[in-house]
Image (cartoon, rainbow, N blue to C red):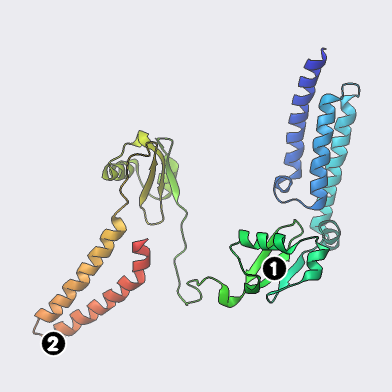
Amino acid sequence: MPDWLQVIVRTLAAVIFLFILTRLLGKRQISQLSFFEYITGITIGDLAATISLELDGHWSLGVISLSVWVAVSLGIEYLQLKSKKVRGIIDSSGTVLIKDGKILEDNLKKEKLTNEELMEQLRKKSIFKAAEVEFAVMEPNGEINALLKKENQPLTPSMLGIKVAPEIEPQAVILDGVAMEEPLATIGKSMGWLKTELDKLGVSLDNVFLGQVDAYGQLYVDLYDDQIKVPQPQEKPVLLANLKKCEADLELFALSTKDETSKKMFEQCAAKLEKVIQNTKPLLKS
């Protein structure tokens, strides 16, 4: 067999074998790596290249070496699952870099990290002042995670004692100009509903690159032709306007009636509806 053909055959075989081994090692090999996983990935790649190009050596020896590396890696991962002590030895542990807004310089030196690199990592998490950080730690995989002090954390509904409904993920109902029946069925919509919504927007199905339906049943589309301006869905603004109109009607009824019982009833209903409008306005304006 010619050398060039042998290289092709060996390379294809190495690719297939590497794919099988990677599936065995799991998704961690392509995500955040520990020290050992980093070494394993480099070594396996080097062995695969050697199998492809070293024509003087027998390919089976390279396969055996790869198999041993993968077996060792799987064995260590099994031990890590069973023993916290083994996890601490192989993956090490996190290092505290900031505590109570104070940078721990000794720990920075231990991790060979400069203050500029620390601030760069904090800025990636939208943190620009170290004094605002309650706690920051470098994880075993090298990533830095930080917790802001209570007074610097973004305000959330739970802090205000407000209960909010769970957010439902948007469904992609149109992809590359093709309507997707399964996502439509998931949100309880039909093809007829989708056609009606597209008619409201004045666009055709084949011109839609991506169409999504949000948690409130509104359709948003991105078109192939970027020059076409697509009007925003009006269901929520129209609903808000109708609620305000109902409130105004109730207040008008209260002013126009001479019956005190009816007047009081209309005023109470108008006040309750006003509270509903104030609570729902952030959702209906978004």
Tag 2 and tag 1, C-beta contact below 8 Å:
no
Q: Residue 141 location, x and y as percent?
A: 75, 56
Is 9 left, or right, of 236 in this rendering? Answer: right
Report crowding for label 1: few under 14, some 14 to 19, many 20 or more residues within 10 A (C-alpha).
many
Residue displayed at 87% across by 21% down: 55
**Residue shown at the point (81%, 60%) measured from the top left:** 112
Q: Specify the label residue 262 is tagged with.
A: none
Q: CA distance from mark 2 to mark 1?
A: 64 Å
Give SS at disc 1: strand
Name the side, left or right, on which 152 lies relative to 63. left
Q: Position of residue 53 (x, y in %)?
A: 83, 25
**Helix, strand or loop status at disc 2:** helix
Q: Quick check: 120 left or right of 9? A: left
In what quadrant of the picture does the N terminus appear? top right
Q: Is residue 13 above or below residue 39?
A: above
In the current view of this chain or complex, which residue is farthest to the front? 116
In this view of the protein, which residue sits in the foreground, 165 or 97? Answer: 97
Q: How many marks?
A: 2
Please tell me whether residue 129 is drawn above or below residue 232 in the rendered image. Answer: below
Residue type pointed to by label 1: Ala
Residue at the image point whose x is 82% and y is 38% from the top = 44
User: Which residue does the numbered mark 1 point to in the structure image?
Assistant: 136
Residue 131 in the image: state x and y as whole percent: 65, 74
Q: Could you tell me residue 181's position as x and y percent?
A: 41, 40
Q: Amino acid at mark 2?
A: Glu
Residue at label 2? 260
- Place residue 165 in its image quadrant: bottom left
